[in-house]
C-alpha cells in the first residue's frame, strides 16, 4: 500500500514537471485595498472594502450590468427586475430555483438552496437591535409592519424573525413580495445593494458571536483564507452556477467594452480561480507593490504619485511601455462644505444671512482646491448630484458656485458686512465682530489643506475663519447634533439616483443625513413630490428645482466629484470600473502566461 | 531577595491602578464616541443610543471603570468593537509578527552597538572616533519615516533585493524574505543613538581609577576592556535595554504599516483610528504590565552582573 502511494506521488510529480501548465494554470489576481476590512457580515458592515468583499461572497436580488453606462439594474438571483405595483408600493420578486449557498458545517453536509425565506430573514436583520446595523435606515418607515416589530424589539432586545408581516410576504419557496408604507420608485435600488443580500439563518445561529468571520453566501467566490487586516483570499465557489457576460447594453465604440467582450467571449464567469487582497494603508508600498508586479492592478492610484503616473494627464512613458492601462473614473460622490443653517452667524434664511453664505461660496478658491490640494483629480461640482447618477443634469450650470471674490465683496458690502471697528476684519451688519469656525477631520492631510484654504480665501475678503481639527468621531457627532458653524463633508452614492444625494438637505432628515439642518418648506415639498414619480420628465423638473434652491440658499459650498485612476497590467483582461459596485473580480480574466513571464522577469 | 521581589510586586498595584485611571479618563475625555463611527452614514439618536448600550458606554462612569478593572484582572477584554474579534485572539495573533521583527532587531542592534561603542571608546579623540560620531549625529537627525521611504524604494524597488512589502504564514519565509528589510531599517536607525550612548558609558568607565590601576598592574588592554570596562558598563547598558525591551513586544507601527506586517503596532493604530477601546485598553495595560515586570527582572539581573548590588 505504502509503495503504491509512493508510486502515485511520483507519477504526479513527473506529470507536474512534464506539464508545468497543469500546476501553473490557476488564474490568480493580486491587489491591495487602501484600508483594512472589518468583517463580512453584510448586514453589519458599512466600510467600502468589507462591502467590496461581500459583493463576491453574496448575491442580491438585483445588480448592475457590468458594461452599461449609465448604470442599469439587471436581475441577479431574481428572475426579473420587477415593475412597481400598487402605485409604487409593492415589489414582487421570483427567485431563480436551484441557487445554492456555499458549503458550510452549519448545513450538516447537505446542499442548501436559496429561498425567499432567506431574504425575509436577512431584511429583518437590519432592524434587529442586537445587530445594530449601520444600514437600518434602508428599511426604516419602509415595509408595512416592520417598524412595529422594531418597536417591540426595543423592549425585548431582539427582533421577532418569525411572525409574518404584510411588508415582507413570502408567497412560496421562491416568491417574495414587499409592501411599502408609501410609494418609493427607488426601492429596487436598495435591493441591489451589496448589504441587502441573503444570509442563511442556520449559519448566523451557528456562529452567533462571529458572523463577521463566517460569511456563507451564494456568490461566485468563497472566503478561503482570512488573516484579519493582512490578507484576504477568495476562491471560486464550487457550488456557484456561473454567469455569462451580458453584452446587450455594451457600447460598441467603447474600447473597454470591446476588450471585455473579446476577453470573455464564450467563457463561463467567474474565470478567476483565486483573488488575493492585501490591505495596505500606506500609499508608497501600495504603489511600489504594483510597480514591482507583486500586484496585478491598483485601484485608486495614490494622489501623491499622480504626477509621476500621469504627467500632463497622459500615462507616463515607462508605464505605457509595459502596456499598463489606466481607467479614469469620475466617482459617484460629491464633496462639500456644510454651513449650519441653525447657527446664529452663518445660518438663517433672511436675505442678509443668505448673502453671507453666498459671498463665502463665491470667495472660496475652489480652483486652487482642485488644482493644488487634489492635484487636478476632481471635477468642480455644479450640483450635489455627480455624473453617472440618474437625475444628473449635464446642462445645469451654477454661476453661484464660481470663484469670484469681487462679487463676494460687493455682496457683503451691500448687506452691511463691513469693517466697522477698523480692525481689518468685516463685522456683522449690527456691528458685532465675528469669527467662523471650520471643523474638519484631524486625521487627514487633505482635509487640513482644505481647511487652511478656507481660512486663506476668507481672509482675502476680510472674513475670519478659524480651522479646527477634531477627531473623526467628534466631527460626526458635532454634525449630527448641529454643534458646528462650518464643516467638511462628502457623500458617496449608495444607489445611482439623485434622490440619494438630494435627501441630504431634506428637512426631516435633520440630525441624520441633513448635516446643514436645512429646513426650507419649498425644498421639502419638491422632495416629497419627487418621491411619488418614477424617473422621467416630471421628476427631473422637480430635481432641477431642488438644485436651484440649494444654489440660492447656499447651505453648502459644493466641492468636487473626485476622479480616480485605476491601473492594470496588460495581462489583466476585461477590466472596467463600475461606478456603484466596488469590485469586479467576477468579470476579470488573466493571461497566465503573460503574467508569469512578466512577474518572473521582475524577480 | 524574595522579600524585595514581593515588595516590588506589591508596588505594581498602585502603578497599574494609575495606568487604568489614566487610560479610562483619556478615552472618555478625548477618545470620541465610538457609536458615532459605528452608526454608519445615516442614523438617528435612537440607533446611536442602541449602539452605546451594546458597547456599554451608556453605563455610569464608575460602572465602566469597574468593568475595566475586572477585565484587567481576568485578562478578558471582550471583543473588538469594530470587528467583533476577541481581543485576546488579536493580541495572540499579532504578537508573533512583531517579535519576528523586533527580537532580531534587539539582538543585532545591541551586539553591534556594544561592539562598536567599545571600539570607538577605545580610540576616543581620534579621527575615527570623530568621524563615527559625525555619522551618528547625522543619522540621528533624519526622520525614521525618511529612512523607511528611501530604504523601501531603494532596496525593495530599485535594487530588488527584498520584497517591497508582504507577510506569509510561514515563520521561516517571513524571517528569510519579508523581515530582513524592516530589520535592516530598524537596526540602521537605532544603531546611531545606541552607539553614542554606549560609547559614553564606556568612556565613563575607562576614566575610572580601577582601569588606571589595572593598566598600571600590567594587564593586557584586551583584558582591561573586555573584563573590567565592559562588565562595569553593563549596568547602564542593561538599564537601557530594559527601557527598550517593552517596545519589542509592541513593535514599530511605522515599520508594520509600511511593510504590511500584521503586528501589534499596526493593530494599535487601526484601533485608535476606529476608537476601538477594548483593543486600546488591552494593549496599554499589557504594555504597562510588561514594562513593570521587565523593570523588575532588570533590577534582579543587576545582582548577577554586579555582586556589589544588594536588594533592600
Image (spheres, coloured by chain):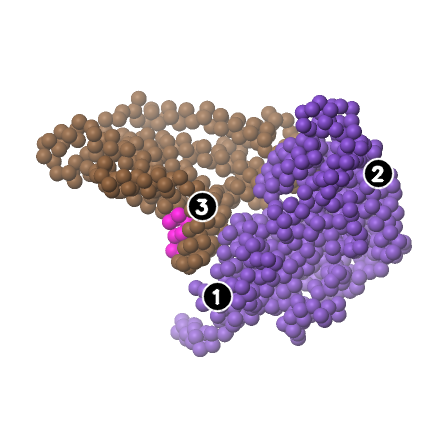
Q: Residues within 10 Å of mark 1 (few under 14, many from 20)?
A: some
Relative side of A102 to A75, left or right: left
The C terminus of chain A sits in image quarter? bottom left
Q: Residues within 10 Å of mark 3 (few under 14, many from 20)?
A: few
**Residue to which mark 1 is pinned:** A599
Q: Is residue B296 or residue A158 the one in the foreground?
A: B296
Above or below — where is A25 with respect to A285? below
Relative side of B58 to B3, left or right: right
Look at the image and tell me whether residue A229 can be seen. no
Q: Which residues fall within the magenta stretch?
A: B175-185
**Residue to which mark 2 is pinned:** A520
For the residues labelled 1 and 3, the Cα–Cα distance comes to 28 Å
Residue B257 on image: x %, y %: 49, 47
Q: How crowded is mark 2: few (under 14 residues within 10 Å), some or many (20 or more)?
A: some
For the residue labelled by badge 3, is the local secondary structure a helix, a strand or a loop? Answer: helix
- Of label 1 and label 2, which has the lower sequence position? 2
> Which image quadrant is residue A496 in?
bottom right
Above or below — where is B30 with respect to B87? above
> Which image quadrant is residue A579 in?
bottom right
Marks 2 and 1: in contact by CB < 8 Å? no
Q: Is residue B56 or residue A425 the one in the foreground?
A: A425
For the residues labelled 2 and 3, the Cα–Cα distance comes to 52 Å
**Number of numbered discs present?**
3
Relative side of B253 to B199, left or right: right
In the image, which is nearer the foreground, mark 2 or mark 3?
A: 3
In the figure, what tint was chain B given?
Answer: brown
For the residues labelled 1 and 2, the Cα–Cα distance comes to 59 Å
Task: Please report the residue visible at 61 percent of the width from the left and 35 percent of the height from the top.
Answer: A469
For the residue labelled by badge 2, is the local secondary structure a helix, a strand or a loop? Answer: loop
Tag 1 subunit: A
**Residue to which mark 3 is pinned:** B146
Amino acid at each position: 500500500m505504502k509503495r503504491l502511494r509512493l508510486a502515485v506521488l511520483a507519477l504526479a510529480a513527473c506529470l507536474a514537471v512534464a506539464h508545468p501548465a497543469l500546476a501553473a494554470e490557476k488564474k490568480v489576481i493580486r491587489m491591495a485595498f487602501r484600508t483594512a476590512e472589518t468583517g463580512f457580515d453584510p448586514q453589519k458592515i458599512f466600510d467600502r472594502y468589507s462591502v467590496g468583499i461581500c459583493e463576491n461572497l453574496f448575491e442580491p436580488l438585483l445588480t448592475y450590468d457590468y458594461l452599461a453606462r449609465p448604470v442599469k439594474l439587471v436581475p441577479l438571483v431574481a428572475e426579473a427586475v420587477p415593475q412597481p405595483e400598487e402605485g409604487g408600493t409593492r415589489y414582487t420578486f421570483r427567485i431563480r430555483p436551484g441557487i445554492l449557498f456555499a458549503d458550510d458545517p452549519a448545513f450538516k453536509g447537505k446542499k442548501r438552496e436559496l429561498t425567499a425565506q432567506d431574504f425575509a430573514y436577512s431584511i429583518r436583520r437590519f432592524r434587529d437591535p442586537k445587530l445594530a446595523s449601520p444600514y437600518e435606515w434602508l428599511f426604516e418607515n419602509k415595509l408595512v409592519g416592520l417598524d412595529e416589530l422594531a418597536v417591540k424589539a426595543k423592549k425585548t432586545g431582539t427582533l421577532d424573525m418569525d411572525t409574518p408581516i404584510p411588508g415582507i410576504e413570502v408567497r412560496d419557496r421562491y416568491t417574495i413580495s414587499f409592501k411599502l408604507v408609501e410609494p418609493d420608485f427607488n426601492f429596487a435600488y436598495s435591493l441591489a445593494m451589496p448589504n441587502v443580500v441573503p444570509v442563511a439563518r442556520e449559519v448566523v445561529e451557528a456562529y452567533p458571536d462571529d458572523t463577521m468571520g463566517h460569511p456563507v453566501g451564494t456568490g461566485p467566490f468563497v472566503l478561503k483564507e482570512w488573516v484579519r487586516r493582512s490578507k484576504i483570499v477568495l476562491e471560486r465557489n464550487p457550488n456557484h452556477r456561473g454567469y455569462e457576460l451580458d453584452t446587450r447594453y455594451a457600447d460598441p465604440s467603447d474600447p473597454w467594452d470591446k476588450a471585455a467582450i473579446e476577453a470573455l467571449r464564450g467563457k463561463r464567469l467567474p474565470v478567476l480561480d483565486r483573488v488575493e487582497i492585501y490591505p495596505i494603508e500606506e500609499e508608497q508600498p501600495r504603489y511600489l507593490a504594483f510597480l514591482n508586479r507583486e500586484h496585478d492592478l491598483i485601484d485608486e492610484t495614490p494622489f501623491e504619485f499622480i504626477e509621476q503616473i500621469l504627467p500632463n494627464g497622459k500615462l507616463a512613458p515607462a508605464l505605457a511601455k509595459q502596456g499598463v492601462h489606466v481607467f479614469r473614473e469620475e466617482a459617484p460622490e460629491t464633496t462639500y462644505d456644510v454651513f449650519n443653517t441653525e447657527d446664529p452667524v452663518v445660518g438663517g434664511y433672511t436675505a442678509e444671512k443668505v448673502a453671507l453664505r453666498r459671498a463665502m461660496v463665491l470667495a472660496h478658491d475652489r480652483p486652487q482646491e482642485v488644482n493644488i490640494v487634489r492635484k487636478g483629480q476632481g471635477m468642480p461640482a455644479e450640483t450635489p448630484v455627480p455624473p453617472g447618477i440618474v437625475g444628473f443634469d449635464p446642462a445645469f450650470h451654477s454661476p453661484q458656485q464660481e470663484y469670484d471674490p469681487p462679487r463676494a465683496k460687493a455682496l457683503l458690502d451691500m448687506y452691511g458686512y463691513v469693517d466697522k471697528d477698523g480692525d481689518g476684519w468685516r463685522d456683522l451688519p449690527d456691528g458685532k465682530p465675528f469669527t467662523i469656525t471650520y471643523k474638519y477631520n484631524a486625521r487627514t492631510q487633505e482635509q487640513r489643506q482644505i481647511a487652511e484654504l478656507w481660512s486663506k480665501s476668507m481672509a482675502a475678503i476680510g472674513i475670519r475663519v478659524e480651522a479646527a481639527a477634531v477627531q473623526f468621531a467628534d466631527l460626526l457627532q458635532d454634525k449630527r447634533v448641529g454643534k458646528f458653524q462650518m464643516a467638511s463633508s462628502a457623500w458617496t452614492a449608495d444607489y445611482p439616483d439623485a434622490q440619494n444625494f438630494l435627501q441630504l438637505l431634506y428637512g426631516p432628515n435633520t440630525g441624520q443625513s441633513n448635516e446643514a439642518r436645512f429646513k426650507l418648506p419649498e425644498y421639502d415639498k419638491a422632495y416629497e413630490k419627487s418621491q411619488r414619480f418614477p424617473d422621467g420628465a416630471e421628476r427631473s423638473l422637480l430635481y432641477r428645482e431642488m438644485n436651484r434652491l440649494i444654489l440660492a440658499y447656499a447651505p453648502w459650498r459644493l466641492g468636487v466629484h473626485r476622479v480616480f485612476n485605476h491601473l492594470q497590467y496588460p495581462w489583466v483582461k476585461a477590466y472596467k470600473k463600475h461606478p456603484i459596485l466596488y469590485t469586479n473580480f467576477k468579470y476579470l480574466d488573466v493571461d497566465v502566461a503573460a503574467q508569469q513571464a512578466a512577474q518572473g522577469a521582475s524577480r | 531577595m524574595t522579600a524585595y521581589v514581593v515588595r516590588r510586586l506589591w508596588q505594581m498595584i498602585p502603578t497599574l491602578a494609575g495606568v487604568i485611571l489614566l487610560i479610562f479618563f483619556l478615552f472618555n475625555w478625548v477618545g470620541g464616541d465610538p457609536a458615532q463611527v459605528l452608526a454608519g452614514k445615516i442614523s438617528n439618536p435612537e440607533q446611536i443610543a442602541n449602539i452605546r448600550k451594546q458597547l456599554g458606554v451608556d453605563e455610569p462612569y464608575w460602572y465602566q471603570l469597574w468593568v475595566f478593572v475586572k477585565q484587567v484582572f481576568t485578562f478578558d477584554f471582550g471583543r473588538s468593537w469594530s470587528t467583533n474579534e476577541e481581543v485576546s485572539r488579536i493580541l495572540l495573533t499579532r504578537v508573533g509578527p512583531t517579535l519576528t521583527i523586533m527580537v532580531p532587531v534587539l539582538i543585532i542592534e545591541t551586539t553591534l552597538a556594544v561592539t562598536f561603542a567599545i571600539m570607538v571608546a577605545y580610540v576616543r579623540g581620534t579621527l575615527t572616533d570623530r568621524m563615527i560620531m559625525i555619522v551618528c549625529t547625522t543619522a540621528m537627525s533624519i526622520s525614521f519615516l525618511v529612512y523607511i521611504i528611501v530604504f523601501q524604494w531603494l532596496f525593495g524597488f530599485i535594487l530588488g533585493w527584498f520584497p517591497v512589502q508582504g507577510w506569509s504564514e510561514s515563520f521561516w519565509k517571513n524571517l528569510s524574505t519579508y523581515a530582513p528589510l524592516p530589520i535592516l531599517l530598524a537596526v540602521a536607525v537605532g544603531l546611531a543613538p545606541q552607539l553614542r550612548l554606549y560609547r559614553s558609558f564606556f568612556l565613563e568607565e575607562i576614566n575610572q581609577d580601577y582601569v588606571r590601576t589595572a593598566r598600571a598592574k600590567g594587564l593586557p588592554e584586551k583584558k582591561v576592556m573586555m573584563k573590567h570596562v565592559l562588565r562595569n558598563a553593563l549596568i547602564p547598558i542593561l538599564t537601557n535595554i530594559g527601557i527598550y525591551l517593552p517596545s519589542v513586544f509592541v513593535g514599530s507601527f511605522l515599520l508594520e504599516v509600511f511593510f504590511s506586517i500584521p503586528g501589534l503596532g499596526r493593530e494599535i493604530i487601526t484601533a485608535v483610528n476606529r476608537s476601538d477601546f477594548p483593543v486600546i485598553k488591552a494593549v496599554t495595560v499589557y504594555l504597562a504590565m510588561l514594562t513593570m515586570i521587565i523593570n523588575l527582572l532588570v533590577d534582579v539581573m543587576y545582582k548577577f552582573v554586579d555582586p556589589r548590588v544588594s536588594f533592600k
